[in-house]
Image: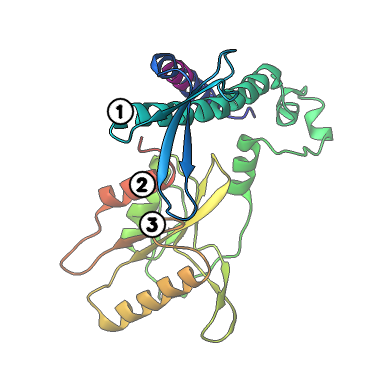
Amino acid sequence: MQLDLQPIIDRQKELERVIRELTARIAQAPPGHLVISKHKQSESVKYYQCVSGDGDEHRSSKKTYIRKTDLALIKALANKGYYLTVLSRVRAEYAVISRFLKTYPAELGEDIYPKLSEDRKPLVDPYWEPADVFLERWLREEYPRKGFREDDPYYVTERGERVRSKSELIIANWLFQHGIPYRYECALELWDPKQPRRITIYPDFTILDPATGKCFYLEHLGMMEDERYFRSAMDRISLYEANGYFVGESLLLSFESDKVPLDVRTLGRRVEHALGRDS
């Protein structure tokens, strides 16, 4: 699995542009460098232009006083000194990036297992599990579920699993149709600061980001017109956030009431954004 080098390459190109631009600005600047002298008692400031005869900007052979009215020259020399310092740092960074890109290996440790023969792979326990292997295992693994009571509503998704409501059916089918890996009502252990103790909850959907291997949680709040349900939903959100799962980041929400039905398109955009697919 190769590191994404594009941001580093982009940075290298940006540094090249900066080097060209700063070099041109320095070439157009007045000769010498600026010296600022400040009197300790009066705190008056004097400016001097120091020009070296041997080309060394910081070994002065001639020091000329600059009147404060000649602000353009003072600023030009001050900018020149600033540009020279920035240029030295930029060149140092550029050199490091260039060496890195030149020596970065074409094959990484993560790349070895996928290249093994099909006869050898079953004999090896990979140190780095390939993303496709991890995804297949994650989808296949059994996980602790909430379970159903006899009188619970009965809806079956396109993936062949049972859910509790028509809205959850719509959400599950949308995830399945868009190839987004998920688990329905998979147990999640959280710390409840009100108790205080660890408790187990069952998020409606646990969604896996195949690109990162990280999970985020989707809760459908379907009876928001009911005051008791609303308060319970707010407590549940607070519990998530107390454990570091924040709304809009690792916790996604969808809403519904008698007058406002589930908006699966908006929910879809939230999921796609969380997965980084909305660019």
Is residue 79 in sight in this rendering? no
Q: Is residue 133 left or right of residue 177?
A: right
Upstream in sequence: badge 3 or badge 1:
1
Task: Say what amino acid the circle numbered 1 marks.
Answer: Ala
Residue where numbered disc 3 is placed: 248
Secondary structure at numbered mark 2: helix
Q: Position of residue 25 (x, y in %)?
A: 40, 18
Which circle marks residue 3 in the picture? none
The disc placed on residue 72 is: 1
Q: Which residue is mark 2?
A: 174
Please identify the quadrant where the N terminus is shown: top right
Q: Secondary structure at mark 3?
A: loop
Find out whether residue 96 is within the magenta segment.
no
| Depth order, front residue of 162/63 | 63
Looking at the image, the residue that sits furthest to the right is 123
Q: CA distance from mark 3 to mark 1?
A: 51 Å
Q: Is residue 95 visible?
A: yes
